[in-house]
């Protein structure tokens, strides 16, 4: 059996395989307990518009940016990189945005 070679190394994954693996491991590693902690810390409201509907855990440094820049999964899913946004505000962010709305509430 011949081993496929990517980028000169027999066990290296192609960029698309790495990206798929990275995304699936990132989303699966953020626990419900961590999400609950973030929502509690942020007062169970969107930090941008103060809505309490359809809250989501938003990555300040996005999963996309983390993969693109080689940032470790543990840093991407660290609660210090997560903030509470409503679905509407989260959907309005670009993948490369690093807007930290926690600064608005702390400053």
Image (cartoon, rainbow, N blue to C red):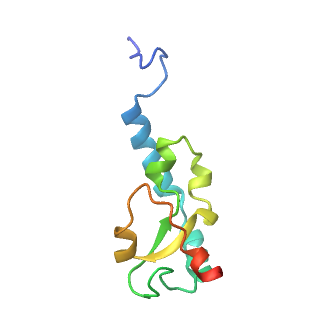
Q: Which residue is at 47% across, 56% downward?
A: 62
The quarter of the displayed image where residue 3 is located: top left
Q: Residue 102: x percent and y percent? A: 59, 75
For residue 94, above or below residue 11: below
For residue 16, above or below residue 47: above
Q: Camera-side residue: 95 or 29?
A: 95
Quarter holding the N terminus is top left
Q: Which residue is at 44% across, 88% downward?
A: 52
Q: Camera-side residue: 105 or 17?
A: 105
For residue 18, above or below residue 60: above
Q: Which residue is at 47% across, 42% downward?
A: 68
Instruction: In the displayed orientation, state which residue is furthest to the top.
Output: 2
Q: Residue 89: x percent and y percent? A: 38, 75
- Number of dots carrying numbers: 0
For residue 81, above or below residue 68: below
Left or right of 91 on screen, residue 28: right
Q: Residue 93: x percent and y percent? A: 39, 65
Q: Which residue is at 61% across, 74% downward?
A: 103
Quarter holding the C terminus is bottom right
């Amino acid at each position: 059996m011949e081993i496929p070679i990517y980028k000169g190394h027999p066990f290296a994954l192609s960029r698309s395989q790495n990206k798929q693996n990275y995304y699936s491991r990132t989303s699966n590693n953020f626990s419900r307990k961590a999400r609950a902690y973030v929502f509690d810390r942020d007062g169970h409201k969107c930090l941008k518009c103060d809505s309490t509907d359809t809250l989501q855990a938003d990555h300040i440094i996005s999963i996309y940016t983390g993969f693109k820049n080689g940032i470790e999964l543990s840093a991407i899913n660290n609660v210090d990189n997560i903030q509470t946004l409503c679905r509407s505000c989260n959907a309005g962010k670009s993948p490369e945005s690093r807007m930290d709305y926690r600064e608005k509430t702390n400053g």
